[in-house]
Structures are given as C-alpha cells and as structure tokens.
Amino acid sequence: MFGTAAEGAHEGSGLTQAEAAARLLRDGPNELPQDRRRRLPDIAWEAVREPMLQLLLAAGVIYLLLGNLSEALILLGFAVLNVLMVVVQEARTENALAALRELASPQALVWRGGQRLHVPARELVVGDVVCLAEGERVPADAVLLEAAALQADEALLTGESVPVRKRVVADVAEAMPGGEDTPFVWAGSLVTSGSGVARVSATGSHTAIGRIGTSLGSVEAAPPPLQVQMRRLVWLFATAGIGASILLAVAYGLLHGQWLQAVLAGITLAMATLPEEFPLVLTIFLVLGAWRMSRRHVLARRSAAIEALGTATLLCTDKTGTLTQNRMSVAKLRADGQSLAMAEDAAELPEQFHELVEFSILASRPDPFDPMEQAFHRLGQQKLMNTEHLHPDWVLAHDYPLQPELLAMSQAWRGLGGDMHVIAAKGAPEAVADLCHMDEAGLEAVRLGVAELAAEGLRVLAVAKGVYTGAGWPEKQHDFDFTFLGLAGLADPLRPGVPQAVAACRGAGIGVAMITGDHPVTALAIARQAGIEARHVLTGQDMAALDAEGLQKALVDTRVFARIMPEQKLRLVQAFAANDEVVAMTGDGVNDAPSLKAAHIGVAMGGRGTDVAREAASLVLLDDDFTSLVAAIRLGRRIDANLRKAFSYILAVHVPIAGMSLIPVLLGWPLLLGPVHVVFLEMIIDPASSIVFEAEREDAGIMSRPPRRPGAPLFSLGLLAGGLAQGGAVLVAALLVFLAGVHGAGGENTGRAMAFTTLVLGNLGLVLSNKVLDGGGVAALWRPNLALFVVVAVAAVALGLALTVPELRHLFLFSPLSVNEVFVALLAALASLLVNAAFIAAHGALRRRFGV
C-alpha cells in the first residue's frame, strides 16, 4: 500500500501494543456505546398507561362483565395490538445506533510496535497511526500526517456529493467535516482517491459520526398533533360519561327507589357515552392507511405519522440523494467558444466536443472511485461508443497526482506505438490554463467560460492534451507541452419528476425548503431547477450568528439553506416547528438521522438511504421517488378528511343514544333503551365509523386545498358542535316518534319499537350526511362504497328480524308494528337526514366563505 518512505517515517511513531491495550481499556472500544435496553415489561407498562389504551381495556372489561364476549374480545384484541406496536416502535432508536456501528470499517491497517498490522477497527485508540487507501472507509476521526493526492467523500456527514481534497496543514482554525485542503479525516467517510497516513484523534462516541448517534439517542420525536388531541378528547368524554352515569344511577335510585334499575340505567348511559370507538377507529385507520401506503411504495414505520402527513405545512428536503440522484454527471461542455448542454437522450455529440470528452476520460483512472471521473466514463460510453475516441487497449504508463500547489493531474498513456505517449490533464481551470502557458486573451476566454458554468451551479474542470516522446519522465507536469481543449461542468442532476412533485406540493399549500451542505451557488441552481422558492440563501455561518428568536424570524421567508452542518439541520427543524409549522423532513444520509427523528414526519429514502436514516424516519420511500411522496401526502389528506367524518359521526350517533337513556329517567318515563339495544346499535356504529369511513374515497380537489392550519385541531369546536347538532336532530325525531307510538294500542312497547326503528334508520342517515362533511356535495352520496352497502344490508336484516321474530321482540321489549307505524318511523328518520344535510351544506358554505 505504501512504499518504504512511509515505513521509515512511521516505524517508530505508532503506539506499542501495551500502550494501545491500556488506552483501549481506559477509553473503551471504537464503536458507539450500547444504550441500556429497557426491559419489555417496562415498555409494555408505559404503553398501558396511555389514556387511549386504558379506555380500550376499560370498555373491554365492561363488555366482558355484561356477558358480551365477542365485543370484549375485539376491544381487548385491539388493546394487545396497540401494546405490540408501541414495543416495536420503542426499539427504533437502538436499531439506528446498531446501523451506525455497521458503518465503521471492520479492519484497519495500523502501526503498532514498529510494525504494520491489520486490527479490528473497534480496537483503535487515540494516538494510533493508521494507513488510508483508495476505496476504504476511514475507521476513526484522525489528523493527516502524510497525504498523496488524497480525496474523501464526506456526503454521509455533510450531504455534499463532491469529494473534498485533503492535505497536511499545520494550523487550521476549526475541525469540522467538509471544506477543501484540511488535514482532518472523519470516521465513516470514504477515500475516493489517493492515500495517506493519519493519527487517530477520536474514537467511538467522540467521533463526528458518534456524536450524531449520541444526539439521535437523545432527540425526542415531536408528538403528532392528532395524538395530543385524541388523549385530551378521550379523557374529556370518558370523565363526562362516567360521571354522568354515576349521577344518573344515584338520581334514579333516590327518585324511584329501584336501585337495580338505577344500576342498569347507569350502565346503559355509560355504554352510550363512553367513546371506545375513538381509539378503535384511529387504530383501524392507521393500520389500513399503512397498508394502502405500502401499495404505493411507502413504508410507514410510525403509524401516527400517516395522519400527520396529511396536515404537513412544510417539507424540508435534503439535496444530495433526495432532490438529486447522488450521482455526478456532465451537465455542460464548452470548447472553441461554444457551449453544449448535455442531455442523455441526445442522439449524437457534435464533433467539436469529441476530443474534450476523449481526454477527460484519459485524464481519469481506468476504474475510478471518484464520482466525477465516473461521470466522464459514463459520458464516453453514451456518446463515443464505436468511435476512435475510446482507447480500452491503451496502457497507463505514468501519472502525476493532484498536488496542493497545482490543482491538476496528468496521466500518460502508451498506445500509439514507439516511444510516443499521449498525455491527458484535468483539474481546476486556472491550474490547467497555467499548464498550457496561455496568453492573456486565452486566459480571459477561460475566465468567461468558467463564470458561465459556475453561475449555473456547476463544478468546473478544465481538460488539456499533450504528446511526449522523451526517454525519461519529467519531474513536473509543467515540463509537458499542453494544448487547452475546453471546460466541463458537472452537477448532481435532479431526480426525474422532482419539479412536478414540488409543484404539486405548492398547489396543496405545502412549502418546500432545501437544506444542504453544498455551496450556496449550487444550492440556488438546484432550487431553481426544482421549482423551490429561491430568493436568497441562509448559510450555516449566517445561521450560527443567529439566536433562537432571530433564526425563527429568518425562516419566515427563507427556503434555501446551504453549508449546513448536521447539528444545524436539527436546529432548523426545531425552529420551523417553533414557528407552528408541521414539518416533514426527507433525507437519506447519516447526517439526516437526528432531524428525521425530530420532525413531525421523517421521510427516508429506502433505496439509496442509509440504515440509520431509515430506522430514524417515520416513513420510508421504498422506490426513492418523489412522486410517491406526493401520493403519500394525498393519502394522508384522505385519512385526515375521513377521520373528521368518522369522529363527527361518532359524536352525532352517541347523542340520541345517550339522550334516550337519560331523558326518560329525568322525566319519569319508562326506560326506552337497555344494554341489548345499545349493543345492537354498536353493531352498526363500530363498522360504520371504522371500515365504512376508512374506505371512503377522497374528494377530487383534496390536493388543491391548503392543509389544516397549524395548531387548528382535527376535532374543532365546529366539528364538535356539528356532530352534537346532527345527533340532536335524530334524538328529536326518535322522541317524537316514541310519544306518537306510546299512545297507540301497544303502549310503551310500541313506542319503544317505533323509536328504536327511527334510531337505527337515523343512524344510517348520519353515515350518509357525514359522507358530505368536507364539501363533497350530492356526488359524495353516490360515491361507491362497498363497506357501506354491506353495513346497510346487515343493519336492515337485523332490524327486520328484531321487529318480526317473537323471541327477539320479547328480548327487545317490542310490540308488533303495523306498516303505517313503520312508515312513520321511516319518515321521521328521513326528515332528520334532510335537516342534517341542509345543516352540513350551510356549514360548509360558511367554512369556504369565511375560513371557519
């Protein structure tokens, strides 16, 4: 790997085996520390303490005591499923740390006791002298002692796709990843060219990548707004329902002296008011939502983020590997004063650019690691195949690597026969122009060309050619006679479909911000190509000078961020959240993991993404396609809208049930509903609120609406009032029907049967009225929904059996109904449906006009 000079220079500079062993014992292994694992009982106990789960368990126990085994088993089954989901999610941070440990090189070449030894990377200690070579990962943070044309890809830490040069420098102000000509190499980065010798300066959790792992373990994921609202709503209804049930039982017992009936009335009211459907519906929506997303190549790792995605107001995206392909390509060529924008689908390359591409390949390694050299080879295969400009049979005879004092490299090829060698050079334009000994006019032309390409955010290299026939190789590249051929502008191109995806987000009222470690000019160029608002750029240096309040103000009108360090990404996400944005953060590198976890919705790339990013994220794009993200946002909005419909329905349907349990007691009437009636109604409520509304298709204009305002609850006062009003209409209809029926020949049992029929039909009417809750209009009523058809059919058959089968009539305390009595109940239910439809239409018009 290294010659004798390296051996002589470092034979005595490494640690002895005894010193290394002592430091390893003192500092620990060169790996991320294993967090103390919580035991499964501890995690399960934390899950059981969740209010939603407690309500599921309580409702299941109540149904079990009442003898309704099937309902109890369903609710308790969902409780167990909830616990399992929490246990799985709590393991994600430990999985991310394990993935971070895998990034380290398993072996390292190190000087120990005057010998070069291969040792496990986990055994490296501070002070060890390690050897670095092309294609290897750096095993620990280190400072270079020697470097020969060394370049490293630090994209995992900085997000910048172009490798950076490394050189031995005595005095550097600050040690951080990124930047050219620094002496620091970082654990997890990849050596793309050259070689070097470095002294280890940090290991394990003290490395830059280790600090990311430490921060990832301490970052708290932002709780989705829905989860917070759900807890508050569940506690409110549970407290009110149980309190009202106790008061009702006591009042009935004191007024009538019938304490057994009092307990039965209290239990009936508790069953009518306990909103056990809330957690049940949320669980079903999120489980089925995850299944629907998987069919669109989006993996949901944290189910609560599915709904939150529908309310996202800002999408923070990394540039490298997310907006772009993380693959350098030649974007533009300039030769003989002419420029050519490259397109992969172009049929031919004009002849005047053939030589420029030919010598850019000859100036690159035959089998390169460097992404820019790979780009030149790909261009040659695409445009020069079957021409005389490709030379697979030529032999590399000599090379001159990149040097700090001359940012250009040359390679000499033997292939023309005799002693003649073809020389190809590439590098920084000013360095190549210097090799070509250009006059002032030529230099000015080069400057103009560089300015043109650099203004487009391109990385610019110059290419030159020469011929050499001497006996020995010159000491320096300057001794060759070079001819300047032209300039090549390279870029990491956008992924296909990104501009359309950004436009779709803008149309949906979602802002898009780009956060990158790249140069501001490059960031602006990519942002403009993608369609991201790019009036100005905030750099990491600018950001470091701002306090928390100043940063929040700066973020109001800034959407492009450049030269951003990993810890600053996390700070940006937290500042956006402090500005009441619901933040979705996309990324694929190690540097993205803390911000992915801190965001409301972390979205990792599944194909190109690292394990660390995938484990930290809430959602994973399996195909790395931005259009899949737009589909996920659309599905998230569908879930958001359908949850509103389902919860409005649940609120509405409990009003008449609770009213018909409470009002007869207060007015001294006979009890209208018992537990059997409530259980029958639950047979309709549970599938209607969960399966029917979950299967409801989205409105056509769902992506043209702005997201729900930050801080605006899903269960707004308007939604609560609307649900109560709808339920009130059904309650009034059922009570009027009861009063009409109780004076008939059948008395109390006839009135009960008519009121119950109205209640069941009114329940189905509430399903229909809430289908149009978000402005779908009459068309929403006719939108096909197989689950609704099944629920209506089953409810109609079950009601018919309860009204006609004598044994069931006796159980329900019904009298036989005439056709006219059934017709009266049907008309009352229809009237409540029309009233509710008119109310929802008027409420929707007010919302659209006044934004309420």
Image (cartoon, rainbow, N blue to C red):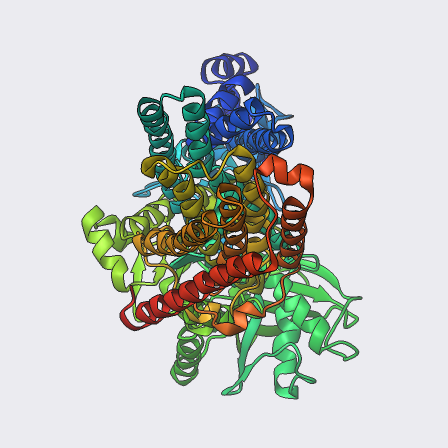
Please tell me whether residue 436 is drawn above or below residue 543 in the rendered image.
below
Residue at point 29%, 60% (across, down): 538
Residue 301 visible in the picture:
no
Vertically, is 21 above or below 670?
above
Measured as percent of width and height from the top left, residue 648 is found at 43, 53
Q: Is residue 272 left or right of residue 472?
A: left
Q: Residue at x 51, y 60 (%)?
A: 824
Would residue 362 be found to the left or right of residue 487 on screen?
right
**Residue 806 in the image: above or below residue 496:** above
Image quadrant holding the N terminus, namely top right
Q: Nearer the viewer, residue 643 or 263?
A: 263
Residue 299 appears at what percent x and percent y?
60, 49
Indicate left or right for 69 with 552 as reference.
right
Taking depth in this image into account, of 755 and 192 the one nearest to the observer is 755
Count of numbered marks: 0
Residue 358 sits in which quadrant? bottom right
Q: Quadrant of the C terminus?
A: bottom left
Q: Nearer the viewer, residue 456 or 528?
A: 528
Instruction: Residue 474 in the image: state x and y as whole percent.
Output: 59, 61
Q: Is residue 576 above or below residue 447?
A: above
Q: Is residue 526 visible?
A: yes
- The quadrant where residue 345 appears: bottom right
Measured as percent of width and height from the top left, residue 398 is found at 66, 58
